[in-house]
Amino acid sequence: MYRIRCLNNISERGLSVFRDQGYELGESIFDGDAIVLRSHKLNVEELNSEVLAIGRAGAGVNNIPVEVCTEKGVVVFNTPGANANAVKELVLAGLLLSVRGVSEGINFVQNLDVSSEKKEMNKIVESSKKVFKGTELRGKTLGVLGLGAIGSMVAETALNLGMKVIGYDPALSVEAAWKLSSQVERINNLPDLFAGADIVTLHIPASKETMGIVDKDLLNNFNDSGVLLNFSREEIVDEKGVRESLANGKVKKFISDFPTPSMLGVENVILMPHLGASTSEAEENCAFMVASQITEFLQNGNIKNSVNFPEVNLERTLGSFRLAVVNRNVPKILGSVLSALADKNINVLDMLNKSKDEIAYNLIDIDTKVSDQLLAEISRIEGVVNTRGFH
C-alpha cells in the first residue's frame, strides 16, 4: 500500500482517487511514497529518502526545490491547464477593471453618507459618475506574453470581445500552436509586443530567465500610456520599474494578483489576494489531475505532466514484470543495465527509454519477478540514481 503525505487542503475529488486505490493519506506521514501540496513551501529537509514523487495541485512549482528533486530522482508533477479557465475569468475581470472606473466607483459609493436621503444620494451619484468614465475593450489591442494553456484562452476571450490580439511566446509548443486562433498575430520580440499593445497581460512562468523581465525599459516601449496585468507570477515584474512607469505616465494602470507592501496605496494600482485559481472547480480539477498522475506513476511507472522528467507511457505487457530505472543522462548506462539483465538470463519483453536535460528514465518489462537482489545490483551501476520494481 502506498502512503501519501498531503500538505495544504486538497480537494476531496483528488483525495478520493487515492482512497479508491487503498492508499494511506495524512499530513504526518513523513516517510510517504509521494507528497501532494498546493502552496506549501517545501524545504529540502522534508524530502524523505522514500519519496518517489511530488505533486503540485497547480501549474507553478516555485515552492518546490525542483533541482534537488531531480538530483534525487524524485519526479515533480504539476497540473497545467487544470485551473486555466479560473485564471482566464479573473483576467477578464482585470481587463474590465483596467478600462472602466469600476473599482474606483465602488469605493466612492461605499463611502457615501449612509444618512443621506435617497433623492440626495442619487443627485450626488449622477453628478459624480463622470469622474469614473472609462473606455470600452472593443477595438483595443491586447498583448499576450505567454501563449500556453491560460494565455491562449485569454487571447480567445479577447477576440470574442472584439479586441485585436497580438502575442509573443518564444517557447510555444507545436501542440499549443495548433490550439491558438489564427487571428492572434505572432510578434517576434518583447519590445514590439509592448509597442503594439494598449494592454499587456502576462502568462509566463517564473524562472531564472524571466525574473524581473518586465522592467522600466520594457514598459517604456508602450506607445502611449499602457495597462499591465499580472496574473502569472509576482517575480516576473520589477515593481520599482512599474512604480516609476506609473509616475511618468508610461503605465496608466497596473492590476496584479500578487499584493506586495511596496505596491500598496500606489495610485492606479489594483491588487487582488492571489485569487487566480481560487474556485471550487479549479481546486477540484487540479487535485483530481495530480492524484491521477501520481497513482499512475506509483503503480505503473508512467509519467505525464512532470516538470523535471520526460513524458513516458508504456502499456504493460501481459504477464510481465516491470522495472523502472532513473539514471544520469550519459552514455553506456542503459547498456550496463541491459547487460545486468542478460547476465541473469532475464528476457526483456518491452522497454522505453527517454531523457530530459540531465536525467534519463527507463521502463523495462521483463519475464521475471523483480527481486531485491536485482534492484540492488542495478543500483550499484555508476550513474544510476534509483530503481524500483512493479508486480
Image: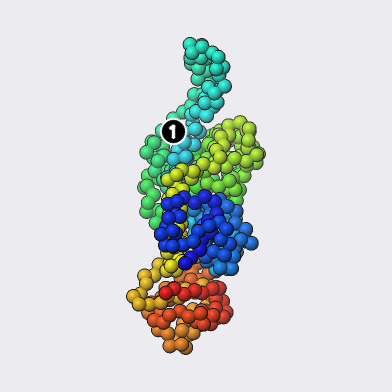
| Residue 180 appears in the figure | yes
Residue at 43% of width from left, 80% of height from top?
Answer: 369
Q: Residue furthest left?
A: 318
Give the vertical position of 270 relative to 80 (above or below): above
Nearest the viewer among 373 and 205 is 373
Q: Secondary structure at mark 1?
A: loop
Q: In which image quadrant can residue 260 be found? A: top right
Instruction: Name the residue that disc number 1 marks.
Output: 137
Q: Position of residue 214 (x, y in %)?
A: 58, 45
* Residue 30, image quadrant: bottom right
Q: Nearer the viewer, residue 74 or 354?
A: 74
Answer whether residue 311 is visible to the viewer in this image. Answer: no
**Residue visible at 46% across and 43% down in the picture:** 279
Q: Residue at x 40, y 53 (%)?
A: 177
Q: Examine the image and state in which quarter residue 141 appears.
A: top left
Using the image, determine if residue 145 lies above or below residue 174: above
User: Which residue is at the front of the view, 235 or 369?
Assistant: 369
The image shows residue 2 at horizontal and vertical percentages of 48, 65
Camera-side residue of 381 and 222: 381
Q: Residues within 10 Å of mark 1 (few under 14, many from 20)?
A: many
Q: Is residue 263 left or right of residue 155?
A: right
